[in-house]
Amino acid sequence: MSGDSFYLEQGTKAKPGINNDGKRIKLPKIGWVRLHEPLPITAFHNCVISRKADRWFIAFKYEIEQPATSPDRPIVGVDIGIKELAVYSNGQTFANPKAYRRMSRKMKRLQRRVSKRVKGSNNRKKAVSKLAKLHLKVSNIRKDAIHKLTTYLAKNHIEIKIEDLQVKAFLKNHKLAGAISDCGMYEFKRQLEYKTQNFSSKLTVVDRFFPSSQICSSCCNHRHKMPLKVRVFECPNCGNIQDRDLNAARNIERWFEGIFIPERSELAVSSTVSACGVDKSDSSHAIATVKQEVNTKITHVQLSLDLGSSG
Ligand SMILES: [Zn+2]
């Protein structure tokens, strides 16, 4: 036994050491152990039993047939969202696991509890163990969500295009969708790398200088600044109005080496701000300007009347 895990051999065919009926597993010396979730009934040569927090896990290797890939899979661009876990260029979204937020709140509470308890006390030990369990649960939820996302992408598309995640992490920092923040970013890319190999699809990482959220994905001819708080892309050139993340995902999908990147214009940013009514002084200024114009017109009319009467 090393650390919190140990290794077991299967033994011989005549006298197998490990048995498995799908719901339970028989281990040498320990006997039958009930499983938390069903195991595939299959032959394996050895396994590792390990402990995380206060739970025990079994890991083993077995052979499976390579899944068949469908030949007509399209290209997809993926934007790692703020609100959603991911937004695909075909308009579909992959939602954040709902349990995640609730768990984060609970975790903060437990962390406070640990820090309040006296060091070395039994109560502190209990609180620490509870916190460790919750950490494991949260990390499992995160892993599960990322696995489902990356499997779906790799299995159903010829080519998957994603952004350079280092840049993404820097731009969005902690505002990122819960489950894919921090280490989730690297896990997302790592899983896509090996899963695209497994399913014979291709992973393309878009150039880090490509301004995917700033360009209009409809006319491709307009580009303006997109601060994070602006959630909708509005193109003054072609009238395209689109969710920020979907617009970015579409740009990511159509990216190729040497793609045309328009000059950045200041046009749409100011119009978005006044349309939202965020800046009140701006709108009152606009009203004042209109009044002034009316006044000027009246003066102009009177003046021409005067001219007419004298002439
Ligand atoms: Zn446009």
Image (cartoon, helix red, strand yellow):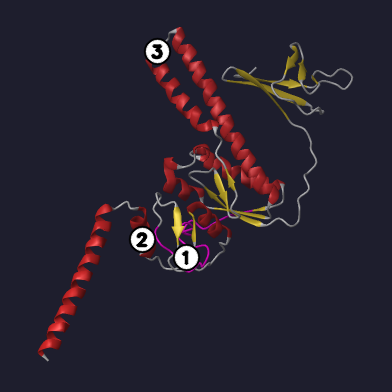
Q: Is residue 208 magenta?
A: yes
- Residue 6's image quarter? top right
Looking at the image, which residue sits at the far front?
309
Q: Which residues are drawn in magenta?
A: 203-225
Rendered view: 66 above or below 222:
above
Residue type at mark 3 is Arg
> Is residue 200 shown left or right of residue 104?
right
Q: How far apart, in angstroms, are the residues tagged by discs 1 and 3?
A: 59 Å
Q: Which residue is mark 1?
A: 239
The spot of residue 63 in percent (x, y) is: 79, 36
> Residue shown at 45%/27% (left/top)?
105
Q: In front here: 288 or 95?
A: 288
Q: Which residue is mark 3?
A: 117
Q: How far apart, in angstroms, are the residues tagged by discs 1 and 2?
A: 13 Å
Residue 271 is marked as 2
The spot of residue 37 in percent (x, y) is: 71, 24
The answer to whether mark 1 is within 8 Å of ligand 1 is: yes
Rendered view: 262 above or below 32:
below
Residue type at mark 2 is Ser
> Residue shown at 52%/21% (left/top)?
132
The answer to whether mark 2 is within 8 Å of ligand 1 is: no
Do residues under tags 1 and 2 come within 8 Å of each other at their CB atoms?
no
SS state under label 3: loop
SS state under label 2: helix
